[in-house]
Image (cartoon, rainbow, N blue to C red):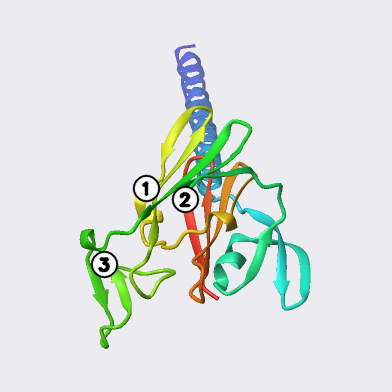
Amino acid sequence: MRQLVLLLILVLCFSCKKKKEAQMVVEDIIIIDTLSTINKQDELVKQKLQELKERFYHIKLYDFETVTDTIVGYDFLESDTNIDYSFDYEPFVKRINSDSISLYTKNMEVVIHKSKFDKTKSKLTYDSDSLNIIQIDNHDVVGAEDVPNSYISKMYLDLSNNIVEIDKRYFEDLYEPNFDLTEAYYYDKEIIIRMGNSDGYLGYNVTFFIDEVLNIKRIIYIP
């Protein structure tokens, strides 16, 4: 009788041990698999958030006497600084003053100021023949080869009565602004400002792109 009891006890212990080991193995597999799946999903979400939104623009592309309506990405606009185009959007209302321009639509306004250039307050760098100015205050000159008459002195946005100043590094090298050839547009949560500056053969175009978080890109087009 005693031997039978001992045998039953051994059988029960061995059975419990096997069951426990099996349960631990199953639990380990579930835990590892679950954590692995969560990590992969998190990584995909992070990658998605880090992706920059691809923007496309409706433009009219001018090629000699041909005008083409097309849709292009920012990379295309940046790839060739000689392309001639205009944006195919409704422009902001424009109000021009003697030394400033206001471009506005519902709940937003772009204001650009120009000032008379004072060469006594700047460092001028001439070329080797000492004829043409190649740099002003250590940045390349755009739109002038002699002492410029005017320059862009201030830019700001008024977004629902919230004033946002544009850093001067985006416009301090732009001379001879022409407000008659200045337009602004709003498309896909982005403000686009297009200027055709200078009044002579050194004319150039500059386009600013300002997105919803106030990142700014600038392209200068020199024919």
Q: Nearest the camera: 79 or 117?
A: 117
Q: Residue at x 44, y 33 (%)?
A: 163
- In primary-sequence order, the first of circles 1 and 3 is 3
Left/right of residue 72 with respect to residue 197 in the rendered view: right
Q: Say what amino acid the circle numbered 3 marks.
A: Asn
Q: Say what amino acid the circle numbered 1 marks.
A: Asp
Q: Hey, which residue is sitting farthest front in the picture? A: 98
Looking at the image, can residue 27 be seen?
yes
- Local SS, label 2: strand
- Local SS, label 1: loop
Question: Crowding near pointer 1: few (<14 within 10 Å), some, many (20+)?
Answer: few
**Residue pointed to by mark 3:** 138
Image: 5 above or below 172: above
Q: Residue at x 57, y 73 (%)?
A: 80
Q: Nearest the camera: 90 or 216?
A: 90
As drawn, the label of residue 154 is: none
Image: 99 above or below 123: above
Question: Which quarter of the image is occupied by the C terminus?
Answer: bottom right
**Residue pointed to by mark 2:** 216
Front of the two marks 3 and 2: 3
**Residue pointed to by mark 1:** 167
Q: Residue at x 51, y 68 (%)?
A: 199
| Image position, residue 190 (x, y; %) | 58, 45
**CA distance for labels 1 and 3:** 17 Å
| Image position, residue 193 (x, y; %) | 56, 52
